[in-house]
Structures are given as C-alpha cells and as structure tokens.
Amino acid sequence: MAVRVFSHDNVSLVHSAKNLLATQGIEGQIRNEFHGGGGHVGLNIVPIELWVVDDQESERAKQLLKELASEGADQKPSWLCQRCGETNWASFDLCWNCQAERVSQ
C-alpha cells in the first residue's frame, strides 16, 4: 500500500524529493501533478503529493526528506532569485524556475 510522504504546491520540489528518494532505492509516485496547476479546480487548491510505493519504506523516506530540509536550513537559508523572484531551497545553486545562478549576499 502506498503512503504519502511529502506534498507541496511547487511541482519541481516534489520531483526533486522523488529523485532524492530514488537515489536511495525508494520508489515514489507523484499524484495531483496536473491538478495543482489550476484548471477548473483553481490554482494551488490541490497539493502535489509524493507517495512511496512500498509502505515499509515510508518512515525511511520521511526521515531522508526531513534530513534534507534540516541540512539545508542549517547550512544556508532559502534564497530569493534575483532574476524572477522565486523562492528556492537552500540546497539549490540554480533557480528551479529560471535557472539563474544563486547570488551571494
């Protein structure tokens, strides 16, 4: 049985989380990817979710994602792209939205 381990309104962050889990051998599925972008439902009303296929891997997956979030927070804060104004995770050196390089301040 699949278990939801992460959700966000930013599809790129959900895909990044899925890729992180894949590097650790944990298979994930993204759900609501096309509903979260708007349409008849409304912008960002339905969160984009990452589900782990094997429920026995769900706790390990949650821990890996938690470690990634806290690791980034300990080292660098999230940053605002100077080009497009998008907020990026601390672990990103390029803006997820426009691929501009992070500018140190």
Image (cartoon, grey):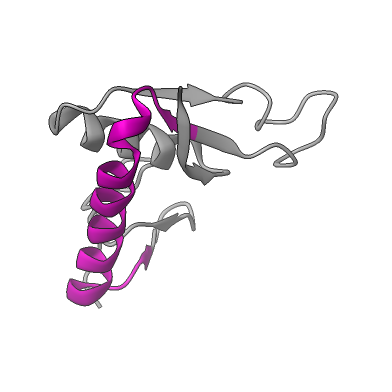
- Residue 38 seen in the current view: yes
Question: At x 49% / y 58%, what residue is drawn?
Answer: 85
* Residue nearest the viewer, comparing 8 with 102: 8
Left or right: residue 12 versus residue 104 is right
Q: Position of residue 75 (x, y in %)?
A: 17, 73
Confirm whether the magenta stretch covers residue 55.
yes
Question: At x 27% / y 62%, what residue is drawn?
Answer: 90
Confirm whether the magenta stretch covers residue 45.
no
Question: How many numbered discs sit on the rendered protein?
Answer: 0
Q: Quadrant of residue 78?
A: bottom left
Q: Is residue 44 above or below residue 64?
A: above
Q: Position of residue 94 (x, y in %)?
A: 25, 48
Q: Is residue 16 above or below residue 84?
A: above
Q: Is residue 30 above or below residue 5?
A: above
Give the residues in magenta.
Answer: 50-79
Left or right: residue 99 versus residue 83 is left
Q: Quadrant of residue 105?
A: bottom left
Predominant SS of the magenta segment: helix
Question: At x 29% / y 42%, what residue is drawn?
Answer: 61
Question: At x 70% / y 41%, what residue is drawn?
Answer: 44
- Residue 97 seen in the current view: no
Q: Position of residue 56 (x, y in %)?
A: 31, 33
* Residue nearest the viewer, comparing 68 with 92: 68
Q: Is residue 27 above or below residue 8?
A: above
Q: Position of residue 46 (x, y in %)?
A: 70, 36
* Residue farthest toward the left in the current orientation of the protein: 24
Left or right: residue 79 versus residue 71 is right
Q: Quadrant of residue 87?
A: bottom left
Left or right: residue 89 versus residue 92 is right
* Residue nearest the viewer, comparing 91 with 70: 70
